Amino acid sequence: MSTKTETLKSRDISGFVTKYAIYIVLVVLVIGIAIYDPRFLSVSILRDILLQSSTRVIIALGAAFILITGGTDLSTGRIVGLTAVISASMLQTQDYGRRFFPDLPHLPLLVPIIIAIVAGLLVGLINGIIVAKLKVPPFIATLGTMVAVYGANSLYFDMKPNQSQPIGGLRPDFSKLGTGSIGSDATYSLPYIVIIAIAVAIIVWIVFNKTKLGKYMYAIGGNIHAAVVSGINVNRYLIYIYSIAGALYGLAGVLEAARTGGATNNYGNMYELDAIAACVVGGVSTSGGIGTVPGVLAGVLIFSVINYGLTFIGISPYWQLIIKGVIIVAAVAFDMRKYMNSK
């Protein structure tokens, strides 16, 4: 009897560890770094980590939409770069000596932001049409748009009179989106960009869990053939999903330009790999059909803690890359093991 009880307890513990592994890893990372240097647990450090994580959260949530359908998006970073350049180019101060558009009048803040987000949505729409209508595998489709978007952004960035010079001199009301905060105390204030990221995460959670789009997204990723048989218009919903992801990348690009105070055509380079890695580590299955918003948030925070925390205690960036690589491979191996066991 005792042996049976011990077996049940062992299974309960194993199930708990499996279910909450991502959160356990995050807590262990924080505790480990804090033991080495207790200053890591200060409010100011937490604020900095949240600030750096904000745009990455929005990007990773966009990538999660596509990964859950069983696809992938390699154009993510280039869409971020395109929308950063578009928004920054139209939101420079009137007296800045090297304006991208010298004769552009003072525009309402929301106009360039909406234009940039729509640009991201349109690239996502193109991705969705190529995948859904032309039946090109997502990896190849988004690889093509990644290259094309970078080329288009570089042509735009190279236009006269700018001619590939970094875009600066951003308007204070735009920069405030990325650097401003609620509260007068610098340490205990809540950055606007963090609030925006939290709002986006809540909206995406609602979409994932409370809408027809979310239900169909999981169904398509779980078994696309069963989804077709059940009457789901797979092509239509794939186009919706890729478009939403593009809009989220566009918003992240706008916020990244506001946060850093400028933009170049190389913004967003390799962001897609960080987004995919955060999603996979956060429990989004590479086979599709599985993924949660809290998991994605935890995945982003794990990599933010690795980047910030290990730098904080003086670990070489090269060791950080090795650690990140090991975590990614382990997460994918664990995901594939669960997938094979479910067969």
Image (spheres, grey):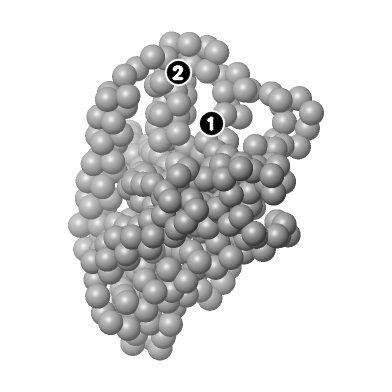
Q: Position of residue 219 (x, y in %)?
A: 39, 73
Question: The disc labelled 2 sits on which kind of residue?
Answer: Phe
The residue that disc 2 covers is 312
Say which of 34 and 153 sits in front.
153
Rendered residue at 53%/76% (across/down): 212
Task: Determine whether the residue tagged by mark 1 lies in a helix, strand or loop.
Answer: helix
Q: Position of residue 276 (x, y in %)?
A: 35, 50
Q: Position of residue 288 (x, y in %)?
A: 33, 63
Lower position in the chain sequence, tag 2 or tag 1: 1
Q: Position of residue 185 (x, y in %)?
A: 76, 25
The residue that disc 1 covers is 49
Task: Determine whether the residue tagged by mark 2 lies in a helix, strand or loop.
Answer: helix
> Distance from label 2 to label 1 (Cα)?
11 Å
Examine the image and state in which quarter residue 126 appears: bottom left
Say which of 14 and 192 sits in front.
192
Give the tally of numbered discs. Answer: 2
For the N terminus, the quadrant is top left
Where is 225 relative to 342, above or below? below
Residue 71 visible? The answer is: no
Rendered residue at 57%/29% (across/down): 48
Say which of 205 and 184 sits in front.
184
For the C terminus, the quadrant is bottom left
Rendered residue at 33%/87% (across/down): 229
- Relative side of 239 to 210, left or right: left
Neighbour class for label 1 at 10 Å: few (<14), some, many (≥20)? some
Question: The disc labelled 1 sits on which kind of residue?
Answer: Ile
Rendered residue at 28%/50% (across/down): 335
Where is 152 relative to 253, above or below? below
Where is 285 relative to 2, above or below? below
